[in-house]
Amino acid sequence: MANTQRHNLVIRKYDGELNLINELAQIIEHNYSELFHSVIVHGSVATNEVIPYSDFDGLLIVKDAYVDSKQLQKFKRESMKIICKFDPLQHHGWFQLLESDLKNYPENYLPVTTLEHAKLIYPRIESLELLLKVNQNVDYRTALIKMLKQFEKREVENWRPNNIFQLKSVLSQVMLIPCLYYSAINGNGIFKRESFNEVKENFNEIEWKPIVISSQIRLNWNNNLNPMQKFLLKQSNPLLRKVIKKYLAPNIDSRTKLLLNDKFYENLSKLIKKIKTDIQ
């Protein structure tokens, strides 16, 4: 295949202590093993850096024959029950690739550098070798531009998060900006955590301030869920979660509101403007 780069990655088994991973591995092994080439965890769970803010980032590499199967949909429903117990505010599902995608790996979907820090959930072996052929002709700009437009639309509408579920979603987007920006500028992927230092010098203190504040809120995260909210938000039914997240999620605490003042959004607009100038 023209203009591809080969990567031989060794994904080692998950070596942390979260029961979440053991539960997922068990249901896969007992009921869904035929569906998957492999199942991988990435992000803070994989690197054993879980904090109260952490959500679950997992990748399903699905055998092509099962991509539209009822079994796969059933697994996702069952596994989300486990994932929502780990993070009641989980705002996304599984990442998913086909086994055939390994021969034309979409680097702009999940960078290879992310997989270099990933851990293996299934199969339950010591390590798995992933042979990837990475297409070098990929579009890194579209995802960034789409996110920037979303921020701009919110600013025009003067939209602000009014509960902690919405807040977590917005903060996660803000903290993804350095990664998307780096890729758009440099034409290759990067591990999210490493992107901050790589691009920070491209911005002045005011432009970078929303990243600093978002990171600060992440480190001091307290979701303030009462027992009823915890119970309801651990339910995995999409329609039920949609209602709960909109009407029953806790309010944002006063300390966080002070950080997310008008100046925060004004500086966020300046950050977006600088990025748009840089990627023109």
Image: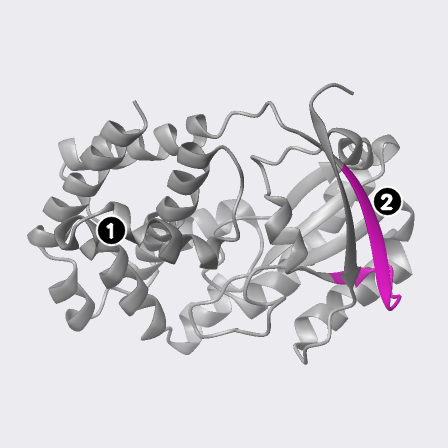
Query: Which quarter of the rendering shows the C terminus?
Result: top left
Residue type at the position of mark 1:
Pro
Q: Position of residue 245 (x, y in %)?
A: 39, 54
Please determine whether, in this image, residue 244 is positioned above or below residue 222: above
Mark 1, other Cα within 10 Å: few <14 / some 14–19 / many ≥20: some
Image quadrant where residue 164 sits: bottom left
Residue type at the position of mark 2:
Leu
Q: Position of residue 54 (x, y in %)?
A: 48, 66
Query: Which quarter of the rendering shows the N terminus?
Result: top right
Q: Secondary structure at mark 1?
A: loop
Residue extending furthest toward the bottom: 17
Please determine whether, in this image, residue 20 is positioned above or below residue 5: below
Magenta residues, start to end: 120-132
Question: Which residue was labeled with disc 1?
Answer: 161
- Label 1 – label 2 distance at C-alpha: 38 Å
Work out whether residue 75 or residue 53 is closer to the camera in this orientation and state it. 53
Tell me: 134 left or right of 264: right
Image quadrant where residue 27 sits: bottom right
Q: Position of residue 83 (x, y in %)?
A: 61, 62
Mark 2, other Cα within 10 Å: few <14 / some 14–19 / many ≥20: many
Instruction: Tell me the residue at 66%/56% (across/down).
Output: 116
Principal secondary structure, stretch drawn in magenta: strand
Q: Is residue 192 magenta?
A: no
